[in-house]
Image: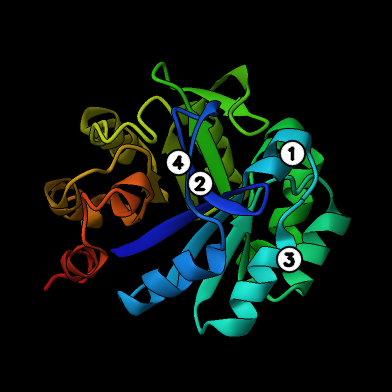
Amino acid sequence: MIVIPAIDIIDGSCVRLTRGDYNLKKKYFSNPLKAAQQWKDKGASWLHIVDLDGARIGTVKNLNIAEKIKQNIDIKIQYGGGIRDIGILKEVLGSGVDRAILGTKAIEDKQFLKTVIEDFKNKTILSLDYGKDGLIFKDGWQKGTEIKLFDFAKELEVLGVKEIIITDISRDGTLKGSNFEFIKKLLKNLNLEIIIAGGVSTLKDITDLKKLEKKGIKGIIIGKALYEGKIDLKKAIEIGIGQ
């Protein structure tokens, strides 16, 4: 089970939000490159970089930061936020990042989703953000939908998707732990590999998620708990690989 540190970017700085609220942001690094180097030094093999400006306005704004990290640090990067057309997707992948994270456009436009799956399957991953009622949010968590996470995930299965990211925004940035009952229900009824995000706050959370690895959890993304010193990344990675 892979453990992936998150780097969320607003106005060029590394920040964390609480429950996706842009008014509740806290800056941790003025230079995200320093955050990336810190997580690399702790053993990270991947970074999860979210362009929160891009997610909100609908076009990438901080791709240059991901490029700079990639140029200076030997680490894999998945980058998302504001990728809403094939041209921008190609630009993101052409920048050197290893995988593009897609959300809003893939939810809104089935033809876009099918094109991505057919032409960019191994270079993209779908990220589904949901509230406490299991309904999907879009546009950088700013707009709710009536689409149920489970229903959309089942559609993705039919289309041949094998792996997704899911983020519980009702817990993201709260340090209150993951919603294990909801996660177990998803794993029981889906045939997808899932990367979990939102609420992971202790090493026990990671140990408990590790126990679900064979049921479909491929990885976890950790944000605020790392920045607040609640979780030591090196120890988290050790749990993830089974040491």
User: Please, what is the three-letter code of the amino acid marked with disc 3?
Assistant: Asn
Badge 1 element: helix
| Residue indicated by mark 4 | 166
Q: Is residue 40 left or right of residue 182?
A: right
Residue found at the far front of this picture? 30
Which of disc 3 and disc 1 is earlier in sequence?
Answer: 3
Residue 113 visible at all: yes
Dot 4, crowdedness within 10 Å: few (<14), some or many (≥20)? Answer: many
Q: Quadrant of the C terminus?
A: bottom left
Q: Are the two marked residues, 4 and 2, in contact with CB atoms closer than 8 angstroms? A: no
Q: Is residue 124 left or right of residue 77?
A: right
Which of disc 2 and disc 1 is earlier in sequence?
Answer: 2
Badge 4 element: strand
User: Please, what is the three-letter code of the amino acid marked with disc 2?
Assistant: Val
* Label 3, label 2: how far apart the Cα atoms are: 17 Å
Dot 2, crowdedness within 10 Å: few (<14), some or many (≥20)? Answer: many
| Residue indicated by mark 3 | 64
